[in-house]
Amino acid sequence: MNESTPLSPIGWRLDNSYARLPDSFYVRQAPNPVRSPSSVLVNDKLAAALGLDPAALRSPEGVAALAGNRLPEGSVPIAEAYAGHQFGYFTMLGDGRAVLLGEQLLPSGGRLDVQLKGSGRTPFSRQGDGRAALGPMLREYVISEAMNGLGIPTTRSLAVTATGQPVQRERELPGAVLTRIAASHLRVGTFEFAAGRGDKSDLTALADYAIQRHDPGLAELPAEERYLRFLEGVIKRQASLIAQWQLVGFVHGVMNTDNMTISGETIDYGPCAFLDTYDPATVFSSIDRNGRYAFGNQPSIAAWNLARLAEALLPLLHEKEEEAVRLAEEAVGTFADPFREQWLSGMRAKLGLVLEESEDDDEALIEDLLTLMKEQRADYTNTFRNLTLGELGEDALCLTPAFGDWKQRWKLRQHREAGVTDEQREALMLRSNPAVIPRNHRVEEALEAAEAGDLTLVERLLHVLENPYAYSPEQQEYASVTRSDAPYRTFCGT
């Protein structure tokens, strides 16, 4: 596609570079039409950034495209093939209910994938119906946009479109299609799929394509360096991503290798949730019975997943297997340092330590606070919010003598930063500690209302979460916590 390609009335400007890979990586698959589609939500700001007309996306033509009833101009729809270690077990997979429409060429340059999720059966569907329910699609919309507001790399949600036909789960639910936008849908599992087929030429084609999409500066390097640098780049992006998850208390819930992107974006918001009570052992997912993907395990699981990527790339790292293994092990071993460095830097910022120079005891100061928070079942987000606002009141944590001792150490540490004003410290904490997160009870009440036909709570929640660092008056009520003896459970509905 070239610069002179005319725009559609909606603004579609699609290319299909993934469909030019070897055909083992996908199947041609059109979305399955639905009965009577209607627009539920359109992300106006994201649409404009993509060069699309939000009003036109709500028109009959736009709704038909977002529901899968009509292909946008230039679309070559495909379902991608990939594999994955799911809870540690290897499985051949693929898009069982998603279709990639193509890549939108942006007004600012570059390209982003446009995918329909819940668009019907594909050859990878196995026993599934290929459809999705309205509630889970709205959930992905809300959480992914909240992550974007928090400044964390993520896939985005362009639209949710009702299908006008039900889906059968535990009960009958209204159906919907999510339009997902991503830097790409390349996953660790995509490389596992290529390696599992044993065709080095296909693996090379995939790696070169991924480099073109995400690390174009490596393309001119000799092969013996190019693929190792590519692996190292993915590792750095994932180390940064997981550190950001940990800093805001995000629990992904299903960190299978097919849910880890090459781009470093968060993808697949199934059984995810944010911490209320701080506990590294927290698990929300109903299917994670052994806690494999607990909050505190996310860094080690990310390293494990990256080791699977390194294994898949072995044939490209060196012609001698022994040397390839050595290079792969060294690369994966570099995950811990950038993760810890970014996490520690972020935690220091959350405590208002402005200067880059750290002290030897900074890590102990942080860990001691987290230990107290766990012991007192303190709310993760609100503890740091209260530290930011100086609202250290009557909650159980603040009333303990141990917290009093910790607070004194913290204040002394702050005062050792010569030349830093209180205003500088406050500004850093305000932009490092969100006032609000998608509280589990708020998400659930909004989705319940939406399924009953009332989008007011979803729209208000999205507005509040758009800038979680605003500390605006309207965010105050969304910072409240509800306590329940029953553990919160999430499901892989998306």
Image: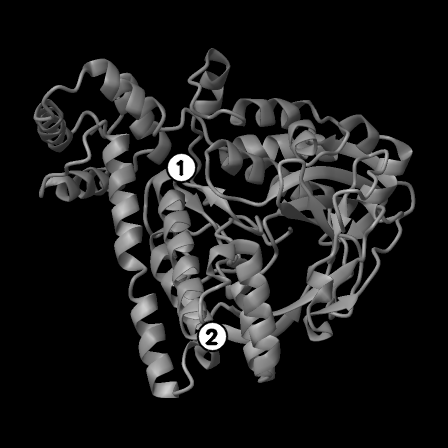
In the rendered structure, the answer to whether residue 163 lies left or right of residue 241 reads right
Task: Say which of 306 and 202 sits in front.
Answer: 202
Instruction: Give neighbour class at mark 1: few <14, some 14-19, many 20+ (Cα, 10 Å).
Output: many
Q: Secondary structure at mark 2?
A: helix
Task: Say which of 469 and 162 sits in front.
Answer: 469
Rendered view: 151 above or below 121: above
* Residue in view at x 29 percent, y 52 percent: 338
In the rendered structure, the answer to whether residue 191 lies left or right of residue 157 reads left
* Residue in view at x 86 percent, y 33 percent: 9
- Which residue is denoted by mark 2 in the rendering? 313
Q: Earlier in the sequence, mark 1 or mark 2?
A: 1
Instruction: Give neighbour class at mark 2: few <14, some 14-19, many 20+ (Cα, 10 Å).
Output: many
Per the rendering, the mark at residue 105 is none
Coordinates of residue 344 in the picture (x, y in percent): 24, 43
Q: Disc 1 marks which amino acid?
A: Asp
In the rendered structure, the answer to whether residue 458 lies left or right of residue 316 reads right
Q: Nearer the viewer, mark 1 or mark 2?
A: 2
Coordinates of residue 172 in the picture (x, y in percent): 78, 48
- One can see residue 190 in this view: no
Rendered view: 117 above or below 460: below
Coordinates of residue 239 in the picture (x, y in percent): 37, 53
- One can see residue 55 in this view: yes
Q: How is the image coloured?
A: one colour
Q: Secondary structure at mark 1?
A: loop
Q: Disc 2 marks which amino acid?
A: Leu
- Which residue is denoted by mark 1 in the rendering? 276
Coordinates of residue 2 in the picture (x, y in percent): 75, 48
